[in-house]
Image (cartoon, grey):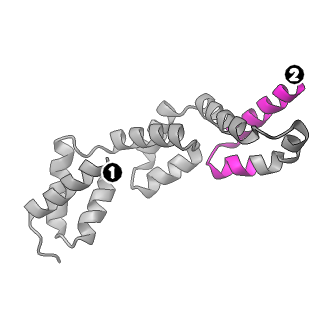
């Protein structure tokens, strides 16, 4: 067990939260890596949650909004990332349903696809369909969003 005090643990957690919002699991893990005693970790995490500094639902909401808008990630990838950050499946599902419903996910996939298709001729775009599908799947988009985005690009080509 570590010999760190509650005050040191609290300070470390506040500094970590000042840099960016974090999940309760991330704070617990960081404090554990710093060798603070389990009782101290539990107390600090509980205190931070009571004060509203630690809120997995707010964290997940910010994470989804940021990563979908700025990085162009889909529901599958975001769900995986949230679980990796220690957010419960229930919270992750609720936040994804609220902030990234299937229609919005398809729009984001379409926007990414348009960027990727810029500069490609129609014939080249058709040849790249498999590659584009894999690219969008790697970004974590659902099959429905991918096929909607690819279908929209086919409609545009025919117009």
Q: Which residue is mark 1?
A: 23
| Residue 49 is inside the magenta segment | no
Q: Residue at x 52, y 53 (%)?
A: 80
Q: How busy is the neighbourhood of tag 1: few (under 14 within 10 Å), some, or many (20 plus)?
A: many
Q: Position of residue 139 (x, y in %)?
A: 62, 49
- Observer-nearest of 6 and 91: 6
Pick whichever, 109 or 48, lies toward us. 109
Query: Where residue 39 sits: x, y (%)?
Result: 15, 65
Please identify the quarter of the rendering in which residue 109 is found. Answer: top right
Looking at this view, name the residue that lies furthest to the bottom: 1
Secondary structure mostly seen in the magenta stretch: helix
Determine crowd level at label 2: few under 14, some 14-19, many 20+ residues with C-alpha closer than 10 A.
few
Disc 2 is placed on an element classified as: loop
The quarter in which the N terminus is drawn is bottom left
Q: Give me the residue at 19% from left, 67% from top.
A: 38
Name the image quarter holding residue 95. top left
Using the rendered view, name the quadrant where residue 4 is placed: bottom left
Examine the rendered structure and indicate whether residue 97 appears above or below residue 137.
above
Q: Report the mark closest to the observer, 1 or 2.
A: 2
Give the residue drawn at x 25%, y 46%. Answer: 54
Locate residue 23, reporting x and y percent: 33, 51
Query: For residue 159, which numbered disc appears in the image?
Result: 2
For the residue pair 97 and 4, the one nearer the viewer reads as 4
Q: Residue at x 39, y 39 (%)?
A: 62
Q: Which region shows up in magenta? A: 133-159
Residue 150 image point, x, y percent: 77, 36
Q: Is residue 135 left or right of residue 78?
A: right
- Distance CA(mark 1)–CA(mark 2): 47 Å
């Amino acid at each position: 067990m570590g010999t760190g005090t509650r005050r040191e643990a609290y300070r470390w957690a506040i500094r970590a939260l000042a840099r960016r919002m974090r999940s309760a699991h991330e704070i617990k893990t960081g404090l554990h890596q710093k060798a603070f005693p389990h009782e101290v970790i539990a107390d600090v995490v509980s205190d931070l949650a009571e004060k509203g500094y630690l809120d997995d639902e707010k964290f997940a909401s910010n994470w989804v909004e940021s990563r979908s808008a700025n990085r162009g990630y889909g529901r599958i990838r975001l769900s995986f990332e949230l679980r990796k950050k220690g957010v419960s499946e229930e919270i992750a599902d609720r936040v994804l349903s609220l902030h990234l419903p299937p229609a919005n996910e398809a729009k984001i996939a379409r926007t990414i696809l348009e960027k990727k298709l810029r500069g490609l001729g129609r014939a080249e775009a058709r040849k790249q369909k498999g590659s584009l599908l894999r690219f969008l799947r790697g970004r974590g988009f659902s099959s429905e969003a991918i096929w909607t985005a690819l279908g929209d690009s086919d409609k545009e080509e025919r117009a």
